[in-house]
């Protein structure tokens, strides 16, 4: 199960990078804002699935190498909903910019999760 967790972790990292890119492009070009918002939901779903797999691994008796791994996972799951809530009434371009900043935070957290596995 931990191999699955590691593999899905790499896929989640890639999806996060794609989301960051799409949100940044949406903010810069002032286009495709709805696509960036939808992709945020898809990536958030991937974070939740990955966290569920991690919980199964943890319950199975395997502990992460670094105790902060669990804290990073909580932060990763929380960053996009917080950004979406924070920018819910902002103009579309500003909302995409907030999502891009949240994408940077999510990418950093996903990277830390990969290296603290």
Image (cartoon, rainbow, N blue to C red):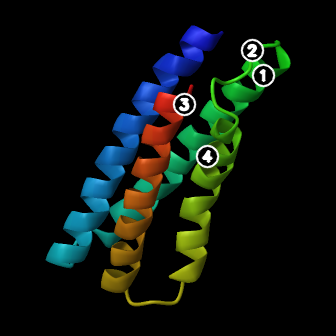
Q: Earlier in the sequence, mark 1 or mark 3?
A: 1
- Residue 16 pos. (x, y %): 39, 46
Please state which of residues 91 and 74 is positioned toward the viewer in this rendering: 74
- Residue 51 pos. (x, y %): 67, 35
- In the picture, the quarter occupied by the N terminus is top right
User: Decide: marks 4, 3 in contact (CB < 8 A)?
Assistant: yes
Query: What is the CA distance from the residue labelled 4 to the residue labelled 2?
Result: 17 Å
Packing grade of label 3 (10 A; few <14, some 14-19, many >=20) is: some
Query: What is the CA distance from the residue labelled 1 to the residue labelled 3?
Result: 14 Å
Please give left or right for residue 72 compared with residue 95 in the image. right
- In the picture, the quarter occupied by the C terminus is top right
Tell me the residue at 39%/90% (across/down): 91
Q: Quadrant of residue 62?
A: top right
Please state which of residues 19 and 33 is positioned toward the viewer in this rendering: 19
Please give left or right for residue 62 compared with residue 10 in the image. right
Query: What is the CA distance from the residue labelled 1 to the residue labelled 4?
Result: 15 Å
Q: Disc 1 on helix, strand or loop?
A: helix
Query: Can you identify the residue that label 2 sits on?
Result: 62
User: Decide: marks 1, 4 in contact (CB < 8 A)?
Assistant: no
Q: Earlier in the sequence, mark 4 or mark 2?
A: 2
Tell me the residue at 45%/35% (across/down): 12
Query: Can you identify the residue that label 3 sits on?
Result: 116
| For discs 1 and 3, the disc positioned in front in the rendered view | 3
Query: Can you identify the residue that label 1 sits on?
Result: 58
Q: Disc 4 on helix, strand or loop?
A: helix
């Amino acid at each position: 199960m931990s191999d699955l967790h590691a593999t899905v972790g790499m896929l989640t990292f890639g999806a996060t990078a794609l989301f960051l890119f799409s949100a940044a492009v949406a903010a810069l070009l002032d286009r495709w804002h709805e696509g960036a918002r939808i992709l945020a939901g898809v990536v958030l779903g991937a974070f939740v699935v990955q966290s569920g797999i991690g919980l199964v691994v943890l319950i199975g008796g395997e502990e992460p190498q670094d105790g902060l791994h669990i804290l990073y996972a909580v932060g990763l799951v929380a960053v996009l909903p917080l950004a979406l809530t924070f920018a819910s009434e902002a103009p579309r371009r500003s909302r995409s910019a907030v999502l891009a900043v949240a994408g940077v935070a999510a990418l950093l957290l996903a990277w830390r999760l990969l290296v603290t596995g």
